[in-house]
Image (cartoon, rainbow, N blue to C red):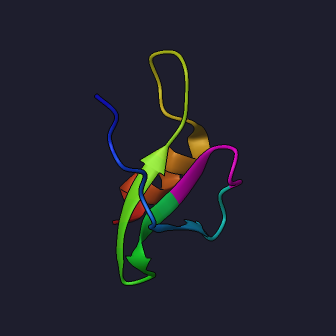
């Protein structure tokens, strides 16, 4: 069985390359943060965002 595709928009995260992380959602105020990485640790840019929140 196939699932329908999503129509949400991907947004840049200020200060982070889109190769590292994006925000996905219907509007900039209603998004989910998505980080792409391999290994055991988050990229430094993402760690900085997490510590700043």
Residue at x-position 47% and y-position 25%: 41
Residue at x-position 55% and y-position 57%: 22
Magenta highlight: main SS: loop
Q: Where is residue 9 in the image (x, y as percent from the top left)?
A: 52, 70
Q: Where is residue 20 in the image (x, y as percent from the top left)?
A: 63, 44
Residue 28 position (above or below residue 48): below
Residue 1 position (above or below residue 51): above
Q: Quadrant of the C terminus?
A: bottom left
Residue at x-position 58% and y-position 41%: 44
Q: Quadrant of the N terminus?
A: top left
Using the rendered view, name the quadrant where residue 8 is placed: bottom left
In the rendered image, the residue lying farthest to the front is 1
In reply to whether residue 46 is colored magenta, the answer given is no
Which of these two is toward me, 22 or 26?
26
Q: In the image, which residues are magenta?
A: 17-22
Q: Position of residue 21 (x, y in %)?
A: 57, 50
């Amino acid at each position: 069985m196939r699932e329908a595709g999503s129509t949400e928009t991907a947004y840049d995260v200020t200060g982070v390359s889109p190769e590292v992380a994006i925000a996905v959602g219907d509007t900039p105020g209603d998004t989910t943060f998505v980080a792409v990485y391999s290994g055991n640790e988050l990229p430094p840019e993402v760690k900085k965002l997490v510590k700043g929140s």
